Amino acid sequence: MAQPGSPAPVEAQLIKDLAATYERMSEQIGKVIVGQKTVVEQLLMAMFSRGHCLLVGVPGLAKTLLVSTVAKILHLSFKRVQFTPDLMPADITGTDILQDDPETGRRRFVFLPGPLFANMILADEINRTPPKTQAALLEAMQEHHVTAGGTTYRLPEPFFVLATQNPIEQEGTYPLPEAQQDRFMFNIRVDYPSRAEEIQIMKATTGTHKPELTAMLDAKQIMQFQQVVRQVVVADHIFAYVADLVRSTRPKEKDAPKWVPELVSWGAGPRACQFLILGGKTRAILYGRVHVTTDDIKAVALPVLRHRIMTTFHADADGITTDDIIKKLIEATPVPLEKGRL
């Protein structure tokens, strides 16, 4: 007899299917993207969690290629939007245009959908467009609909936004405010490849060989897997651990480590707790498990928390990054007992 909260047989099979699909997807992506295993894993975790991603890295690290490769192995519609300083909200959401009705001979307004009407959106260099256009994208991300001419239009499901941002070129840009960054589930750092990987990249991209990719998931299957993720069991001590970890980022919290007020000016909010749990659930399934462990939470802590913590001037002056702070907090936060407190 199944225990309360345990997956039903069909769900258990779906969990096995998702773990196997993740392995095949990683293999397909690896035909094009050299290295970046952690980046690929975090990107797929966000997708199966119904989350959006912010990819941060210097030019030339294959951020755009990674997103377009993921789109190719999925039966999903894909649109790329190059964000520029003159881009207006209607350029991405769509607008009403005046057309002649062939039946009546009269003119009427018809809505022409913008590039947001796709399953997967690559918002390239999101920090290069004005706040008004950024806000239109953020509304679509949160509400999964756009409004034009007083009418609301639903966006296709599933709907993912993967935005890229260049961290070194800030002149003439519009950095996303912290409140808008909070809408992204993950802030994924794309680092330089290793020496061996760089040699492999040169060999793979300067010849005539073009890898063939196999599409393997459609919209219905992805939405089904997203529902399975929500059904993963989370024990009370995991909820307690996540609450303690997130609350320790807040400088005014009485249980926060003594060094936090010196390094952190603003900590993470409740949305960080939600995304840590969802990220932990997804990671557990992708590794073939039906329950979340503290290791799952620790594995997603960096991408979930790094854009939700504001460092102080003292931390900036000493070269202490949000990643450094998160790692210290993980070490300082005790793991509650299995029958831990809430």
Image (tube, rainbow, N blue to C red):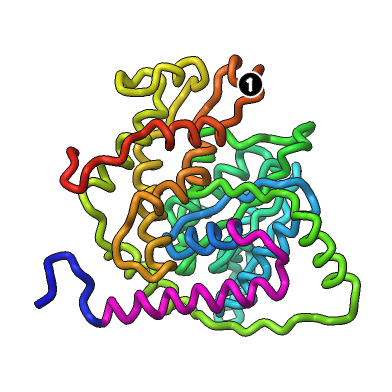
Res 30 quadrant in image: bottom right
- Identify which residue is drawn at 50% across, 15% down: 262
The x, y position of residue 131, in whole percent, is: 62, 37
The x, y position of residue 313, in whole percent, is: 60, 16
The x, y position of residue 283, in whole percent, is: 42, 61
Question: Which residue is tagged 1?
Answer: 316
Give whichever of 76, 224 is nearer the camera.
Answer: 224
- Identify which residue is drawn at 49% across, 22% down: 264
Give whichever of 108, 70 is nearer the camera.
Answer: 70
Classify mark 1: helix, strand or loop.
helix
The question of residue 167 being in magenta is answered with no
The x, y position of residue 127, in whole percent, is: 68, 41
- Identify which residue is drawn at 80% across, 81% down: 210
Q: Is residue 62 left or right of residue 93?
A: right
The question of residue 14 being in magenta is answered with yes
On the question of residue 17 being in view, the answer is yes
The stretch of residues the image draws in magenta is 10-38
Q: Quadrant of the N terminus?
A: bottom left
Q: Is residue 275 above or below residue 254?
A: below
Q: Quadrant of the C terminus?
A: top left
The kind of secondary structure the magenta stretch mainly shows is helix
- Identify which residue is drawn at 84% across, 81% down: 209
Q: Is residue 150 above or below residue 153?
A: above
On the question of residue 87 being in view, the answer is no
Res 288 quadrant in image: bottom left
Q: Is residue 178 above or below residue 23?
A: above
Q: Is residue 314 left or right of residue 340?
A: right
